[in-house]
Amino acid sequence: MSSRAIFDPKLLGETQVLSFDFTSELAIGETINSQTVVATTYSGTDASPSSIISGSASSSGAVVSQKVTGGVLGVMYELLCTITTSLGQTQQQSGFLAVVPDLI
């Protein structure tokens, strides 16, 4: 089963930590064994969309966190988080992140 994460727009100069919550997708006692987050361009142009990802994803309980930074103004990114669990499941969540101008 895959589901959607909801993210507020990110200011161009901002660094944020985004969260993917898998609580409702894990059985009691099931844990996250590994996690990855990848970025692609959903709309707009960015020759290197993966550069918005800063470092590796981490997990605490059923929540995966990923730091994002930079990006290209006006681009909409799709972020896909994939986990494997202690019961051998592979689960995914995706979300869209828009990069907007810094406030003056």
Image (cartoon, rainbow, N blue to C red):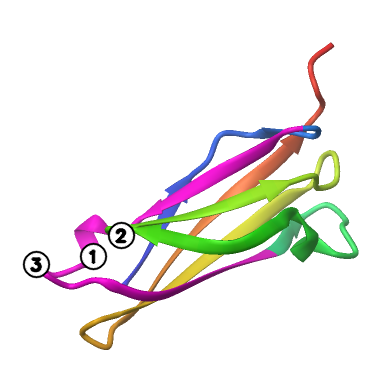
Task: Name the foreground residue: 52 vs 99.
Answer: 52
Q: How far apart are marks 3 and 1 (CA)?
A: 10 Å
Q: Is residue 101 above or below residue 24?
A: above
Residue that mark 1 sits on: 25
- Name the kind of residue labelled 2 in the image: Phe
Which image quadrant: the C terminus? top right
What kind of element bears circle 2? loop
Q: Which residues make up the magenta segment?
A: 14-39
Residue 30 as seen in the image, left or right of residue 46: left
- Name the kind of residue labelled 3 in the image: Ile
Q: How far across and how far down the image is residue 83, in percent? A: 40, 74
Which quadrant of the figure has residue 3?
Answer: bottom left
Q: How far apart are marks 2 and 1 (CA)?
A: 5 Å
| Circles 2, 1 touching at the beta carbon (< 8 Å) | yes
What kind of element bears circle 1? helix
Residue that mark 3 sits on: 28
What kind of element bears circle 3? loop
- Name the kind of residue labelled 1 in the image: Glu
Residue that mark 2 sits on: 22
